[in-house]
Amino acid sequence: MAAIIEVRNVSKSFETKKGEVKALENINLTVEKGELLCIVGASGSGKTTLFNLIAGFEQPTSGEILLNNEVVTGIHSNATMVFQQYALFPWKTVLENIEFGLKMKKISKKKRREIADEYIKLVSLEGFENSYPKELSGGMKQRVSIARALASDSDILLMDEPFGALDAMTRQIMQEQLVKIHEQSKKTIVFITHSIDEALLLSSRLIIFTSRPGRVKSELINHLPKPRTADVQISKEYLELKSMTWETVQQEVLNQIES
Amino acid sequence: MKRPKYMFWLILFSIFFILIFSACDSNTSNINGDEPIASQTITYGGSSWIGHLPAYIAVEKGFFEEQGVDVEFMNFSTSSERMTALASGEIDFASTGAISAISLMAAGDDNFSIFGAPDTYIGQEGIVAKGMTSIEDLRGKKVAVTFASSSHIMLLDIFNQHGLVLNKDVEIINMAGGDIVSSFTTGEIDAGAIWSPHFENLTHVDGAVVLAMDTDTSIYKNYGFGSGPDVLVIRNEFIKDNPNTTEKLVKGYFHSAHWIEENPKEAAELFVTLTNLDIDEQEQIINHVNWLDLEQQKDMLSENGELTGTLEFLASFMTENHLINNSVDVKEWINIDILP
Amino acid sequence: MTSFHNSPTLANQKNTNNFPKRNQKSPPKRKKKKFTLSLKIVSILSFLSFLAIWEIITQMGFIPPLFLPAPSQVVVRGYQMLIDGELIGHIFSSSRRVIVGFLISALAAVPFGILLGSSKTLKAIFDPIISIIRPLPSMAWIPLSLLWLGIGEEQKYAIVFMGSFAPALLYTIDATRSVNPILIKAARNFGASNLTVMREVILPGSMPSIFAGLKVVLGLAWTTVISAELVAANEGLGFLIMNGKEYFMTDVIILGMAMISLTVIIIDIVLNWVEKKIIPWREET
């Protein structure tokens, strides 16, 4: 499989009143096409900064990022972000929100509608086409947000703790659906989380970040069988993988608390 | 959650009640309180208007002091503000526009008395227009006047005489003196009714014609007073608590009026500090005014006196023209017993 | 936050491609109705007891009517003036002046404010002028407005305009700046240009705050009504109050004040209704 995202020797620092703060230090990372990669790290490990760099909102202090072998120099629409706060436009209906990316691509009204309907079905929101976000629950909002990202048809989805604001039950359902959607759509998904369970449940590979500055601490290939049902989640393999990951993460969390 | 909410309301209501009761407490003591005047300083409500000259001179020349009373001269920009101060007991006596005094009577305040008039000031207000020769020409035109002023009454009186109906035949606009002059100059109004010195300023505008004067009013023709004469007013409570001081006050005041008649130049020199006018101009104005002395007051305010007639006429005129809502029997406010 | 809330015991649900539908028909609704109603009753009771205390105190004769007439006296006066047709004329004149002046200021301030809110450079250019105009009381504009516009209705509109323009502008600038930056980020992420972000995100996104701001400004516009009707006005609630002062008609003064409050309350109710119509998506905060 071909690399779709390549992060080469990327460092990023910010100027603050208290001086320079290093958010990312010498990150090297390759994401394969069609992969669902989870990035795990304690807060403050610069994961969101990495997304901003990939989406072109910010430029690395050193190093470079390539998408489909092209260097990212500015904002582009090839990697769509999904935010923890949903970022739905409150003044647009569910349908209009899902159509937004397509509208930006100047796709005709009729075609937009067709595509949007398809994704509404995918996330099971039939009957809510004309509802405003304020009328939806958190889980429904995030499904709209995911549908909006998928409908825009970029190859890459950058999901920044998308389920972080949901309750445990909804969250689990959303995770299962994401796996399904990923299988069906063949998109490349980079998924930030600080839940190890979530990472193990979703990923084909997971990367653990150190905190302040963010560095790649370790990488794990997740061979757990799919679908990762309740049975898988109590299997010996799962628990071993989990404790292994936890040990690594725990050290980082402790470091951060002490610092 | 509930308890603090009710507590809040309870506190709010308590504060509210305390405020209400303390407010009415202070009010009642001001208006109805029987305590004698705490300090012997008596306050006169005045302004730079010529009608306040006797009181001003009496303070400056020490005519009140000679009588053994201490008077303070306090400035108010309008008669209504001065009368409000009198009604709330902040000043003890004043000279004020009759219209304001009658309005206060109509509002039900019977805590003051009229005991005289400082002057008969006449011939210094009128209706000035451009491009017209008679009052009838004002039909369909805009006339500016300061509402609730003597000029307002003058205008209504003259319109009545000529059969002009307000806001049907003529549009009248409420404006202050200075504004009338500038709007008349720019041609935004066709005519203005105003008193001195704005009156003179109006007549100086190019093409200005005087259509009528205060001497043309039915009030003047019948009683010899202008449409808004100055009257001397005093708080009843002050008279009751200080009968001797009241007598001294009146004596001092009319002594001053008499003195002005004989020393207009010196009076002008003193009064210009208040008016900022040229001394000669001031002296001319003082000479123009007919100062009334103590002897004239009793006559004027008697049953059939000219001032009594003027005030009665004004009161019924104001009621007929819906300027006030209640009819007023002016005689109930006239008190000449305090004149020595 | 725990990392282990996906405990295996909870994960007993079957994988299905369909999301559960049971909760979907009833999105989260707040059970506030009853509480709101009882608060309304508290408000009404507090108002009625305020009037009752006022009535009792004035009827007992502690305060002469010249200083504070009884509410019933004010009501009687209001009824008389209503029968005369006079009161409606005053309300109408003032409402027209306030609404026209306010609309002109809103029409000028909203586009201008959006522009200043989205450009730091423009804001820097106009900041000094705004800072100079902002603190000026509407009454301060009377002499200049008379010189420039004369004594007609334009002058009254101008006074209301000068009293409401600066606040409307500042509210709009704030509203524009308060649009959630993540929405702008999301739009850009989909490839929206600056212009598209303005049209698709900033304009609609600032609408609720602009509307809320304008509601406050309309209230402020009413506070200028006395200044607007101080010169060359023969009608209006401001005139009614000031003329009432000349004739010591305290009941008329209080009537004028009450009419201003009442008109503002009615306009507010209408505006809230309009707001629901034109911003149906507004999220309650």
Image (spheres, coloured by chain):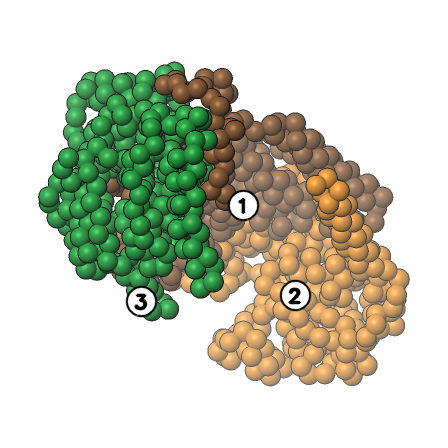
For the question of whether residue C174 can be seen, the reply is no
In the drawing, does residue A214 fall left or right of residue C59? left
Instruction: State the image coordinates of residue C196 (x, y, percent, origin top left).
Output: 22, 38
The amino acid type found where label 3 is placed reads: Glu
The amino acid type found where label 1 is placed reads: Gly
Return the residue at label 1: C238
Give the colour chain C carries in the figure.
brown
Instruction: State the image coordinates of residue C55 (x, y, percent, origin top left).
Output: 78, 40
The amino acid type found where label 2 is placed reads: Asp
In the drawing, does residue B71 fall left or right of residue B260? right
Q: Are marks 3 and 2 in contact (CB under 8 Å)?
A: no
Give the colour chain B carries in the figure.
orange
The quarter of the displayed image where residue B302 is located: bottom right
Return the residue at label 3: A20
A164 in relation to B198, above or below: above
Q: Are marks 3 and 1 in contact (CB under 8 Å)?
A: no
Q: CA distance from mark 3 to mark 2?
A: 85 Å
Instruction: State the image coordinates of residue A22 (x, y, percent, origin top left).
Output: 31, 62
- Chain of the residue that carries numbered disc 3 in the rendered image: A
Q: For mark 3, does the 10 Å Cα neighbourhood hold few (<14), some (14 to 19), or many (20 or more) residues? A: few
Is the C terminus of chain B in the top left, top right, bottom left or bottom right quadrant? Answer: bottom right
Q: Residue at x 67, y 81 (%)?
A: B60
- Secondary element under disc 2, as helix, strand or loop, is strand
Mark on residue B119? 2
What chain is colored green? Answer: A
- Secondary element under disc 3, as helix, strand or loop, is strand
In the drawing, does residue B163 fall left or right of residue A77? right
Q: Are marks 2 and 1 in contact (CB under 8 Å)?
A: no
A9 in relation to B107, above or below: below
